[in-house]
Amino acid sequence: RLSPYSSSLGNYLASGYVDGSVKIWDASISEQNDHAIIRKQKLHAEKVTSVAFSPRNPNIFVSVGYDEQLQLLDIHSKPTEVNLSVDVNQRLTSVSFHENGVNCAVGTVEGNILMYDLRNTRYPIVQVTAHNPNPINMLAFQVNSTV
């Protein structure tokens, strides 16, 4: 018998697709759950390249894509709603949430890293030319841990 997997934040799994759509899955492992899709929505005009959940709120989700958009939404909001859309003006390849749940870094095709404060997304708070002219394939913040 399988016991349910439960994390402190949730049991969701996100996937992004070439057509610009995302799916949020209930990934709880149990005999009663068939891994149901709880949300399916087209968020981008082009390929979705990366997705991430907030480390502070399991219902907050971000996605980025080649359409130069960072999209943030509450997965329990209305299916037609996007809670925040940021036009980055560069094709995006990767995204990572900081553990504070407020800052988010995105990588670009041009090799730039931009960090945003999601409370005020008018401009990035940090912009670094990290790997020009090559794309940033993956980003990850170090998790602060105490021993």
Image (cartoon, rainbow, N blue to C red):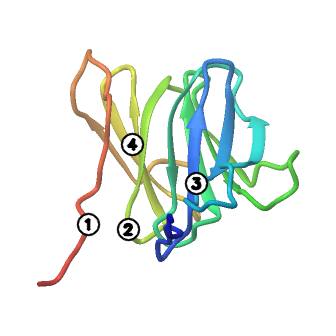
Disc 1 on helix, strand or loop? Answer: loop
Disc 4 on helix, strand or loop? Answer: strand
The label shown at residue 46 is none
Disc 3 on helix, strand or loop? Answer: loop
Q: Name the residue type under label 2.
A: Glu
Q: Name the residue type under label 4.
A: Leu
Q: Name the residue type under label 1.
A: Val
- Residue for point 32% across, 21% down: 135
Task: Give yes or no for contact between labels 2 and 1 (Cβ–Cβ under 8 Å).
Answer: yes
Where in the figure is residue 36, as x and y percent of width and height?
Answer: 72, 49
Mark 3, residue position? 27
Dot 2: few (<14), some (14–19), or many (≥20) neighbours within 10 Å? some
Q: Name the residue type under label 3.
A: Ala
Mark 1, residue position? 143
Task: Give yes or no for contact between labels 3 and 1 (Cβ–Cβ under 8 Å).
Answer: no
Disc 3 from disc 2: Cα separation: 22 Å
Where in the figure is residue 132, as x and y percent of width and height?
Answer: 24, 20
Disc 4 from disc 1: Cα separation: 19 Å
Residue 116 in view in this figure? yes
Dot 1: few (<14), some (14–19), or many (≥20) neighbours within 10 Å? few
Q: How many marks?
A: 4
Q: Is residue 42 above or below residue 127?
A: above
Mark 2, residue position? 99
Observer-nearest residue: 87 or 19?
19
Where in the figure is residue 116, as x and y percent of width and height?
Answer: 46, 53
